[in-house]
Amino acid sequence: MNLKSLKPRIGIRPVIDGRRGGIRESLEQTTMDMAQRVAELYAGQLRYSDGTPVECVVADRCIGGVKEAAMAAEKFGANNVCAVVSVTPCWCYGAETIDMDPLLPKAIWGFNGTERPGAVYLASALAGHNQKGLPAFGIYGRDVQDMGDRAIPEDVREKLLRFGRAAVAVGQMRGKSYLSIGSVSMGIAGSIPDPAFFQEYLGMRNEYVDASEIERRVRLGIYDPEEFRRAMAWTEKYCKKNEGRDYNPERLVYSREEKDAIWEYVVKMTLIFRDLMIGNPKLAEMGFEEEAMGHNAIAGGFQGQRQWTDYKPDGDFSEAILNTSFDWNGIREAFTFATENDTLNGVSMLLMHLLTNRAQLFADVRTFWSPESVERVTGRKLEGRAAAGIIHLINSGSCCLDATGRQSENGQPVMKPFWEITEAEVEACLGATTWYPASREYMRGGGYSSCFLTQGDMPVTMCRLNLIKGQGPVLQIAEGWAVNVDREIFETINDRTDKTWPTTWFAPRLTGKGAFRDVYSVMNNWGANHGAIGYGHIGADLVTLASMLRIPVCMHNLDETGLFRPSAWAAFGMDPEGADYRACENYGPIYR
C-alpha cells in the first residue's frame, strides 16, 4: 500500500556483563551471535503486510552499561525501531542495561545455560522493568543448553516469533489513519468513531470524508480513466458474467441499461474508496494534487446505509473487492475496509490482517442453529465439527473473496498470504462467486452483492473489539472452524434468509465452560452484531498483541498455558484473565 512512513523495525540489543579483564571479552562474540540469530529468525520468518521481510536493527556493540544502552537507543530512534528484543547468555547489570523507552514493546531472552547465569539477568532485568512500570515479555527456554549451542529452542523460537508478529503489528498501525467515508450507519454503535481509543490505544488518527465526495469524484472524473477501463474489462470478464438472478419484486427490477450503469458506478466507487485511503499519483498528473494525497489510511469503512443507499448503489462490490487479495491490477495486499463503517470491526480485521498478512472476512454474527433446530427445519442432522451446532456468518456481500475457500495447500482449503496465491486460485475464487442484484427493499439504489458458500474445513479465528463505558476496549476471541454442512441443509436454511449473500458456517471450539460451554453460549455472549474472521488459529497471537496494546481479553477458548503476556501480568493475581484486566487498567494505553 502507498502509506507514508518508514517500515517499523525490531531493535536487537545484545546485553553483556560489563566487567573488563576477561569476563566481557570472553562473551562478546557469543552475545553478538545471539543477537544476529534473532535478527536472522525475524528476517526469515516474519513479513510486513506488503510481503517484504521484517527488518531488524542490531546495536553496534554489546550493551554492558548505561552509556552503551543510550548509544543503542539513539541508533534505534534514527531507524524507526518499533520494539526491542534484548538477548544475553550471561549475568549483566539489570537497571543499567534495560531499554527505557516507554513507547516500545520489549522482550528479553535470557539464555538457559549453566556456564553463565543468563536466567539470573532475565529475572533481574524483568524486576527492574516491572518496578519502573515498563512491562516486558520474558523468554526463557525450558531446557538447559550448552554455551556454544547456536540453536534457538522451539519454545524460545515460538515466543520470539509471537512477540515479533505482535510488535510489528503495533508498529505498522502507529501513525496511520482510519478513514470514515460517511458517518454512522443505522445507529450501529461501532460506526461511531472514538478518536480517543484510536489515538491512545493504537497510535492512529481518525479521518472523515462525507459520502458526497464519492459523487463529486464520479461527476468530475476524479479517478484514473485508464484504470477504470481496465477495471471494467476485468469486471465484465469475471464478475458481470456471473451476475445472478434478480430476486426483487417486478416493480423494483432495474432495466438492463440501468444495471449496466450500476456496474460502472460501483467500479468507480471502488477506485474512489481506494484513492481516498492511500492516494493515487495519477490524480496529480490529472491536476488533482490534493485528491492525489489520500488520507494515509491503513483501514477504513463506508457508512452506506441508509442515506447513501436510499438513492445510490451500495458499497457491497467495492467492499468485497477491497477486502480481497486481488483485483484488476492483479494479486496484491488486501485492504481492511469495514461494512457500515463499523470502526470496531474494522480494527478487529486490521489486528488479524497485520498478524497473518491475509485477507479478513467481515460478517454479521447472524444466527445460531442448534442441532435440534436444523433437524426440525431440514429433516437432516449436523455431523462432524458441526454436530454441536453452527453459527451462520452472513453479510450483504462485503466478504473477501478469499473466503470462498478456493485457495488450497496440500489439498486442503486455505486463505493464503497474497504472495502465495496463484492466478488459477484467483480464477477459482471468482468462479465460485455470484453477483446478485441487491435487494432494493434494503438498498433502494441497487448494487451487487457477492454470494458464495465458504468451503470448509478451514481453521479460523473470530474476534471482536468492543468499547465498554467505564472499562474501555475489550477483545473477544473464538477459535473454531469454517465447516461444511449437507447441501440440502444449506439450501433450506439459505432460502429462509437472503439467498443473495455469502455464507460461512462457523463451529467454535468448545471448552465445556463459560461462554464456550456450548455454541449457543458463544453466540449469546458475543458483544456486537458483527465479527471479524481470519484464517488459522491465531488466538494466542491476538492475546499477545492485546496485552501490548493494554486491551484485556474478556472471552476466549484458548489453552492458558500457551498465552504469552508481559511478565508483570503475573503480579496482578493468580487468575490469568482477572490479572489481565488489572494489569491493563494499571498501565493504561501506551499513547496516553
Image (cartoon, helix red, strand yellow):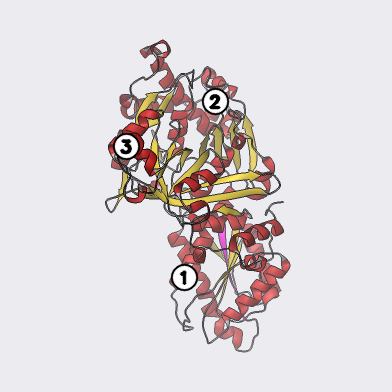
- Amino acid type indicated by mark 3: Ile
Q: Is residue 110 above or below residue 392?
A: below
Q: Is residue 89 above or below residue 184?
A: below
Q: How many residues crowd around disc 2 within 10 Å: few (fewer than 14), some, or many (20 or more)? A: many
| Inter-mark Cα distance, 2 to 1 | 48 Å
Question: Mark 3 highlights which residue?
Answer: 489
Q: How many residues crowd around disc 1 within 10 Å: few (fewer than 14), some, or many (20 or more)? A: few
Please identify the residue farthest to the left as the structure is shown.
Answer: 411
Visible in this render: residue 453?
no
User: In the image, which is nearer the foreground, mark 2 or mark 3?
Assistant: 3
Visible in this render: residue 220?
yes
Residue at disc 1, secondary structure:
helix
Q: Main secondary structure of the magenta part?
A: loop
State the image coordinates of residue 547 (x, y, percent, origin top left): 60, 58
Q: Start and end of the magenta stretch?
A: 1-20
Question: Mark 1 highlights which residue?
Answer: 155
Left/right placement of residue 356 relative to residue 414 reads right
Question: Mark 2 highlights which residue?
Answer: 305
Residue at disc 3, secondary structure:
helix
- Amino acid type indicated by mark 1: Asp
